[in-house]
């Protein structure tokens, strides 16, 4: 359902519709600690696999998932729907939204309105502490064409309302963060979104966006470059500031969309409004921050080495990458305020990507040496060393538990994929590995596009991991599946 402009006015932008990000008039965590964690043992909770997206003439890939902090049984997934056959001059990819109100057991589904018939993708979904959902994505047409019949591209944000008396499935018209009409130069790609505390008490949350800007997408000409840019909304998504360049001039990348390209913006926002951002380029993970009250970002910092770069081809997959994820521990646990980075790289030099992690306890000024999440036991047959496939990171805001999710296959050739979670209760110092036996091993068709990322969220012990998987009953089309690990029951204090 899309609301008209007049209907939106009747509901009031700064009232129920925006949903002020407050609890008792304050941003959660601004002046009082989050709810302390309850004792539990959740790493061995039974998991359940469910199908999220309906069957159809499309592949569902690139999921993003968010658990509603006000109603944890409410879960939202945004994803890219890639048509298996293009019809006329219509788009070959559109954005979809799937919503569950029973902890992920059943799902409602809809596609995002697309009146000007652009290709859509790079979906991100967030839910603020007020229960208001936000869906970000790109919309474009005309890239890699010498003389496109139509050319346009931009980054968009769509607001949903998931609480109160309004219908659960209300999503408002997308609003441009930036939009270029009749041109794809520059081209805006791969945005990362994050919510932050309001600029003023009682106001809406700030909405932070960073993305890669290509002078000319896919160009190999040396004068065509990429950089990371940033914009923020202080009025609940009605307007956004003009883009501000994050990347230092000597850190611009090429425009080929490969290892030397600036790619993979991922953000976190502290309770005092500091903005942290990370990305990948030139065999490294980069980091920068903007302190409260300061307009510009600082100097780019090489947070970690990423041997092999972020463009990590794997046999049998159309594309594959090791782009980073940045998360902030907002819990009341012992590592509150810690920044975590997780990514894939080829540090073993065998062409089999591996998952690594580092962290910072001083707002990104210094970073630990990268740690391997799954150390290879001594004496392991080199031929059996697995390849990790994509990686996602979550930090439970209740107790600071660190969760890493990825797919995995043995060796470096095409083969069955399995789903894997890794848990850390000690701030990333050690991880416990869990192969999700609830997910039968699967093998996508050779060369099939699995997307660029997987979906993961965690809250109060509940974990939701979303990934594409072929449906043998529907021509092998990719449908999103979710592994659900419920929050364990709270122990009886008198037992």
Image: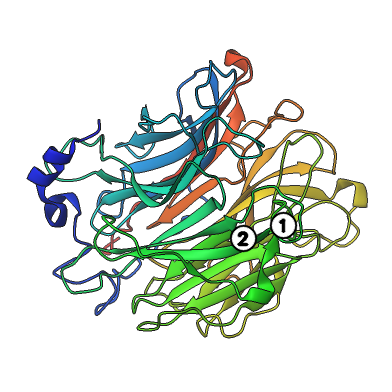
Q: Secondary structure at mark 2?
A: loop
Q: In terms of depth relative to the viewer, which is nearer, 489 or 165?
A: 165
Q: Quadrant of the N terminus?
A: top left
Please give the name of the residue rendered at 59% of the width and 17% of the height, measured from the top-left corner. 85
| Disc assigned to residue 259 | none
Q: Are marks 2 and 1 in contact (CB under 8 Å)?
A: yes
Mark 2, residues whose alpha carbon is within 10 Å: few (<14), some, or many (≥20)? many
Please give the name of the residue rendered at 50% of the width and 54% of the height, measured from the top-left corner. 191
Residue 61 visible, this angle: yes
Mark 1, residues whose alpha carbon is within 10 Å: few (<14), some, or many (≥20)? many
User: Counting residues from the N terminus, which is met first, the one under dot 2 or under dot 1?
Assistant: 1
- Across and down, in percent, residue 326 comes to 54, 65
Lateral position of residue 465 relative to residue 10, left or right: right
- Across and down, in percent, residue 36 comes to 32, 70
Q: Which residue is mark 2?
A: 324
Above or below, comparing residue 472 to residue 323 in the picture:
above
Q: Quadrant of the C terminus?
A: bottom left
Please give the name of the residue rendered at 64% of the width and 36% of the height, measured from the top-left corner. 450
Residue 401 visible, this angle: no
Determine which quarter of the picture holds residue 273.
bottom left
User: What colour-coding does the image apply?
Assistant: rainbow
Q: Residue furthest left?
A: 10
- How much space separates mark 2 and mark 1, taking CA atoms? 8 Å
Lateral position of residue 150 relative to residue 204, left or right: right
Q: Secondary structure at mark 1?
A: loop
- Across and down, in percent, residue 269 comes to 41, 70
Lateral position of residue 342 relative to residue 19, left or right: right
| Disc assigned to residue 310 | 1
């Amino acid at each position: 359902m899309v609301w008209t402009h007049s209907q939106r006015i009747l509901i009031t932008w700064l009232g129920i519709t925006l949903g002020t990000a407050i609890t008792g008039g304050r941003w959660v965590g601004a002046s009082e600690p989050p709810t302390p964690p309850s004792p539990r043992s959740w790493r061995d909770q039974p998991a359940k696999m469910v199908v999220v997206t309906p069957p159809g003439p499309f592949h569902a890939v690139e999921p993003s998932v968010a658990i509603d902090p006000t109603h944890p049984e409410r879960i939202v997934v945004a994803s890219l729907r890639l048509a298996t056959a293009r019809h006329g001059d219509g788009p070959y990819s559109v954005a979809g939204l799937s919503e569950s109100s029973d902890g992920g057991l059943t799902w409602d589904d809809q596609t995002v309105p697309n009146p000007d018939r652009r290709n859509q993708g790079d979906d991100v979904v967030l839910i603020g502490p007020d229960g208001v959902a936000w869906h970000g994505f790109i919309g474009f047409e005309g890239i890699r064409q010498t003389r496109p019949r139509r050319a346009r591209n931009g980054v968009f944000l769509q607001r949903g309302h998931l609480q109160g008396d309004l219908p659960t499935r209300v999503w408002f018209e997308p609003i441009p963060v930036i939009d270029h009409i009749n041109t794809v130069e520059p081209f805006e790609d791969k945005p990362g979104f994050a919510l932050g505390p309001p600029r003023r008490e009682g106001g809406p949350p700030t909405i932070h966006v960073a993305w890669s800007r290509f002078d000319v997408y896919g160009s190999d000409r040396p004068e065509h470059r990429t950089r990371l840019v940033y914009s923020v909304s202080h009025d609940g998504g009605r307007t956004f500031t003009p883009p501000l360049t994050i990347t230092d001039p000597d850190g611009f990348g090429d425009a080929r969309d490969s290892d030397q390209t600036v790619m993979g913006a991922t953000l976190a926002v502290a309770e005092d409004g500091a903005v942290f951002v990370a990305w990948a380029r030139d065999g490294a993970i980069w980091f920068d921050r903007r302190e409260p009250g300061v307009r510009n970002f600082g100097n780019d910092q090489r947070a970690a080495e990423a041997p092999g770069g972020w463009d990590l081809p794997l046999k049998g997959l159309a594309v594959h990458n090791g782009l980073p994820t940045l998360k902030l521990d907002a819990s009341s646990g012992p590592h509150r305020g810690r920044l975590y980075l997780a990514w894939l790289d080829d540090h073993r030099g065998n062409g089999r990507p591996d998952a690594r992690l580092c962290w910072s306890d001083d707002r990104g000024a210094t970073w630990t040496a990268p740690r391997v999440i799954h150390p290879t036991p001594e004496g392991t047959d080199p031929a059996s060393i697995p390849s990790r496939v994509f990686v996602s990171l979550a930090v439970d805001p209740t107790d600071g538990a660190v969760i890493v999710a990825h797919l995995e296959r043995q060796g470096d050739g095409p083969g069955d994929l399995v789903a894997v979670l890794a848990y850390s209760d000690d701030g990333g110092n050690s991880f416990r590995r869990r192969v999700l036996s609830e997910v039968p091993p699967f093998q996508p068709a050779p060369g099939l596009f699995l997307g660029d990322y997987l979906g993961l969220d965690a809250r109060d012990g509940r974990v939701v991991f979303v990934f594409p998987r072929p449906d043998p009953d529907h021509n092998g089309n990719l449908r999103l599946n979710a592994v659900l690990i419920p929050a364990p029951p709270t122990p009886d204090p008198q037992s």
